[in-house]
Image (cartoon, rainbow, N blue to C red):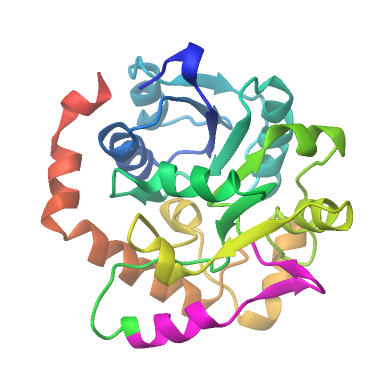
Amino acid sequence: MEDRGNTAVTVLIPHFQTLDSIKLCLRSLRKFTRQPCLVRVLDNGSRDASLDYLRAVPWIELVTTGCTNHCWKAHFEALNAAVPLVTTPYFLLMHSDTYVHHPGWLDYLLDLARTGYAAVGPRHQRVPVRTPLWLPSAVLQHLRVRELAPGVPALRSFCALYETAPFRQLGCRFSTANSLDITCEVNEQLVRAGHRIRGLSAFALSRYLFHASAITLIAQGIQPVAREQTKDACERGASYVDHKTYRRSQNCQQRFLQLASTRAILADDTLDR
């Protein structure tokens, strides 16, 4: 999977105690990535079987970050420590509950980025399994361009590709406030400096990948909160997932895990070697 002489992308995956998710994430990367890339898993203090699993996967670089896990803070602190060590022209943020299922996924993102974008990624938080019931609303969402700040397209962190040079030149750092995605401030900084970023719809990305959202929190047994409490909860480092998001994420994840193709990847431990 890695050819350092011809590697364009470093994939950065923050992780904390999600054995099933990280296993499916990495195995799907192994199975469906044609481009040579370097995969670094940034572990934020896992104390369960997931850490033993990661140590046994020879084709990744496991980084023990030293960050004390916090349901949002350790995530971006680990990335801010990892980005300065990137030596490839691009780096890609990926969540441990993002699963690719098409061999053209990275080519698609890279081809778009190389047309003049400093960042390319999803503008919706969830990319579910394509179903007849979901497709009509997905097409409508596809036509609506979302902005999280005036003139700045929404671009979420669960599969976001950044060009390394402009990111470094501007001294960009990931952060969050008011329960916004950790990429929001960075994206605005890039746009205000004259760079272009491209937000992609869930409909466009559903051909290539799946993301249910908040599975790391759900895996830790953290309970949802009332919607009006999510902002304060995020600032305290507690659960920032409301009841609707919690149910929807669980349902989306279960639907994806029930697919025969997904079960086949989970059963194929040769993808770890």
Q: Is residue 12 above or below residue 88?
A: below
Q: Residue at x 58, y 66 (%)?
A: 123
Residue 238 visible in the snapshot: no
- Residue at point 80% right, 32% down? 168
Magenta-drawn stretch contains 147: yes
Residue visible at 33% across and 33% down? 34
Give the quarter of the figure containing the C terminus: top left
Question: Which percent across, then down, holds residue 195?
Answer: 79, 52
In the image, residue 170 lies at what x, y percent?
87, 39
Direction from residue 172 to residue 104 in the image, left or right: left
State the residue lying farthest toward the front: 115
The quarter holding residue 228 reads bottom right
Image location of residue 48, percent across then percent down: 41, 31
- Seen in the image, is 55 located left or right of residue 132? right
Q: Nearer the viewer, residue 106 or 269?
A: 106
Placement of the N terminus among the 4 image quadrants: top left
Highlighted range, magenta: 136-155
The quarter of the displayed image where residue 211 is located: bottom left
Res 131 → quadrant = bottom left
Judge whether 50 appears above or below 62 on screen: below
Of 265 and 208, nearer the camera is 208
Relative horizontal placement of residue 90, taking residue 130 as reference (left or right): right
Image coords of residue 136 (percent x, y): 35, 87
Give yes or no for residue 174 being in the magenta stretch.
no
Residue sitting at 24 percent across and 67 percent down?
255
Residue 151 visible in the shown view: yes
Q: Nearer the viewer, residue 128 or 36?
A: 36
User: Total number of numbered labels?
Assistant: 0
